[in-house]
Image (tube, rainbow, N blue to C red):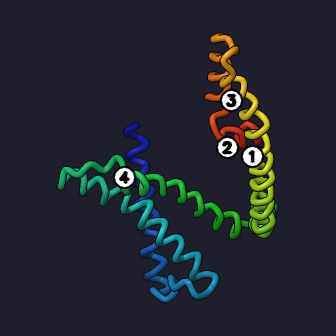
Amino acid sequence: EMALAISEHVFTAYFLLECILRMWAFGWRAFLPFESEGRWNFMDLALVLFTGVLTTWIVPLIDLVAQIETKGGIFGVLMLLRAVRLARLIRVFRDVYIFKEAWLLIRGLADSGRTLFWTIVVVFFVTYGFGIMGLILITEPMQEIASDPSTSSEDLARIASLLTMIGGLDRVMYTLVQ
């Protein structure tokens, strides 16, 4: 645990130093997101500042000085943004020749993003339609049987259990996707 905390500080300092040196070498205009290289520099700077400096140094300092709870709420979201730092690996895949094939795979996935999005939308609506149909076909007969006075208490308990498992449209859709 201590080694991870130390490495977090070391890598945050290293990435911050890298951004400072890049700004010193290329100027602040190289970080304007109007052209390709500027967008990558801007993304790197934003990742370092928000997921590195802010979550590693500033938030714990606020916690220490002001005694504000930083474990949940907006601070929890900021801690979750640390996973976004993996986006820096995209630049490595793009720039290093050894990863040429991996970059082609990433580009192919990115280029097919629009098609994948619409595929997910279509699957959602198909699942939604079948979920409604399943909910009607399954729950209505169960409710009719449950409302019948001649139904035994054992059957009523089973029906109540089944209705609880089916619950609503969200659970039926989840069952259909499984």
Check disc 4 and report the residue beneath it: 73
Position of residue 98 measured from the top left corner of the image (x, y, whole percent)? 76, 61
Identified at 66% across, 25% down, the residue is 147
Q: Are marks 3 and 2 in contact (CB under 8 Å)?
A: no
**Residue beneath the point at 69% across and 21% down:** 148
**Circle 3 or circle 4, nearest the eye:** 3
Residue 65 relative to residue 86: left or right: left
Residue furthest to the front: 149
Q: Amino acid at mark 2?
A: Leu
Separation of marks 4 and 1 at Cα, in angstroms: 35 Å
The span from disc 4 to disc 2 (Cα, nearest Å) is: 30 Å
Is residue 167 depicted above or below 47 in this figure?
above
The amino acid type found where label 4 is placed reads: Gly
Residue 98 in sight in this render: no
For label 4, the SS is helix
Q: Residue at x 37, y 57 (%)?
A: 74
**Label 1 with label 2: CB-CB less than 8 Å:** yes
**Numbered mark located on residue 132 in the image:** 1
Q: CA distance from mark 3 to mark 4?
A: 41 Å
| Residue type beneath disc 1 | Ile
Residue 129 rendering spot, x and y as whole percentages: 78, 51
Crowd tier of the residue under label 4, counting other residues whose Cα lies within 10 Å: few below 14, some 14–19, many 20 or above = few
Point out which mark residue 169 bears: 2
Query: In terms of depth relative to the viewer, which is nearer, 84 or 172?
Result: 172
Q: Find residue 143 and name its label.
A: 3
Relative to the observer, which residue lies in front, 27 or 66?
66
The C terminus - image quarter: top right
Q: Amino acid at mark 3?
A: Gln
> Is 43 placed above or below 127 here?
below
* Label 3 – label 2 distance at C-alpha: 16 Å
- Residue 169 found in image quarter: top right
- Disc 3 or 2, which lies upstream in sequence? 3
